[in-house]
Every structure is written in structure tokens, then in C-alpha cells.
Amino acid sequence: MTTLQPLLLHGAFAAYLIAVSLYLLHLMLRRPWVWRSAFTLVLGGFFLQTLCLAWRWITAGYLPVTNLFATQFFFSWALAATYLYFELRYRIHAAGLFVMFCNLLLLGSALPRNPAIPPLIPALDTPLFTLHVAFSFIGYAFFAMAFSLGVLYLVQRRVHSPLLPDLALLRKLNEESVFLGFCLFTLCMIFGSIWAYVAWGYYFSWNIKGVWSALVWLFFAGMCHAKFVRRWQGSGYAILSIAGFGVVLFTYLGIGLLMSSNHPLD
């Protein structure tokens, strides 16, 4: 089974790579079969990623998201799932190009890393850890989707392409992405607080990761309010979505790579 993991990983990456290429081709040919083929490949890549995630989870006996490879892989899986949700519900078609390109970069940057599953430290050996991390990265995936939709909104506002959803739909999808991401990230914070209290006797620690996670929550809580403020609707909301994902990336990668933190996953 150890030889199966690389095959699944590289198979998923190849499927996403060809899908992105077909989405690009669709922009030129504008043929329905092209985007249908791309979508089929995304489904195939997601299926391979799901098999790999299930195998790693069963092998480890816990959700394996305790190092950079594992979190990037799970983030990529969650982002693909998020895209599929919007595609199946709203038929966004060519709008999937940008988000799947982001997913391709995310998975591609994980492949050179060591996929070995490290032993679980006692503080993480609890279902609260699984819930905390799962809701965190699924929330991140919705924020990444909001980032992609924000970029597409600004592009569509300028080019008015028939290949992209209209501005009203892009605005609606952007707001939905932010709201769902905020709800999931709120659950992440709740389960993380309970986990911290059980493990260390306090609900919140002023370590750098905890502070920035709170800032992410506050930022997107503000965005959930901003959609009702006229001056922040449309382009303003799209810009906030892009800025918010920058905060997410810094919280996820910047702190671990550039700063020291006593958070157990850093």
C-alpha cells in the first residue's frame, strides 16, 4: 500500500493539471464538451485525493494533518470539494479555472514534501483536535473560494465576458463563500477552545497563532456585516475577500515559516 500513495497523489495532480488546461482551452474554443471534460477530470482528481486521504486516515488512526505536507494536502482536498459544491449547485463552468489553478499550485507545492505520517503527540490525541483542524481547513477553503470569486468579480466588471457568471451571481457566490467559511471557522474556534481547555486548562492562549486566528475570525465577521453596507458591496467586497485571504495565508503559512509559535501544529 505504500506504493499506492504516490500513485494517488500524482494521479490527482495530473487530473487537475489537465483540467486546468482544458478550462483554458474552453476560453478559446467555447465548446461545452471541453468544460464537461475538465469537470470530469476534477471529479476524478477529487476521487483520487479522497482515496488517498482515507488511506492515510485509516493507516494513521487519526486525521493526518500534523505537518506541512498533510495540511497542504487536506487544504487542497477541501478546496476541490468547495469548488465542486459551487459547480454542482450554480454551474459556474469557466469560473472554475482560477480556483482550480490555485488548487493545482497548492497540491503541486505539497508533492515535493515528505508525505510520511508522524506519530501523534498526546495533546492531539482527541476528537476535538480532528474537529478543530477539519473545520479550520474547510473554512480556509471557502475563504480561498471567496478570494477566487473576488478576483473574478473584478475581472468581469472590467471585461464583461459571456464565459463568466454575471456580476450579480459572482457577488452572491462571494458572499455565500464568506458566510459559510465564517460559520465553519467559528466551529473551528469553538472546538479549538474546548480542546485547549481540556489539554492545558485555558480556553485561549496569547500565542501568535491564536492571536492571528482570532484576527481571521474578526475580519470575516466584519465581512459578514459589510455585505449590508452599501459602500462595501460589489467591488469593495471583492477587494475585502482578496485581502482576507492574505490574512488567512499569513496565519496558515507565514507564522509557521517566519515566526516562532508554541501552537502544537507549528
Image (cartoon, helix red, strand yellow):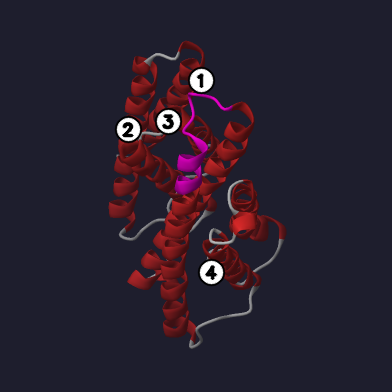
Q: Quadrant of the N terminus?
A: top left
Discs 2, 1 touching: Cβ within 8 Å: no
Residue 126 visible from this viewpoint: no
Front-lying residue, 30 or 199: 30
Mark 1–mark 3 distance (CA, rounded to whole Å): 21 Å
Numbered marks: total: 4
Would you name the residue on which mark 2 appears?
A: 43
Using the image, tell me which numbered label, if any, was put on residue 10: 3
Determine which quarter of the picture holds residue 231. Answer: bottom right
What's the residue type where badge 2 is placed?
Answer: Leu
Range drawn in magenta: 160-173
Q: Residue at x 42, y 80 (%)?
A: 194
Discs 4, 3 touching: Cβ within 8 Å: no
Q: Earlier in the sequence, mark 2 or mark 1?
A: 1
Would you name the residue on which mark 4 appears?
A: 264
Mark 2–mark 1 distance (CA, rounded to whole Å): 17 Å
Q: Quadrant of the C terminus?
A: bottom right
**In the picture shown, does residue 26 fall above or below 232?**
above
In front: mark 1 or mark 3? Answer: 1
In front: mark 2 or mark 1? Answer: 1
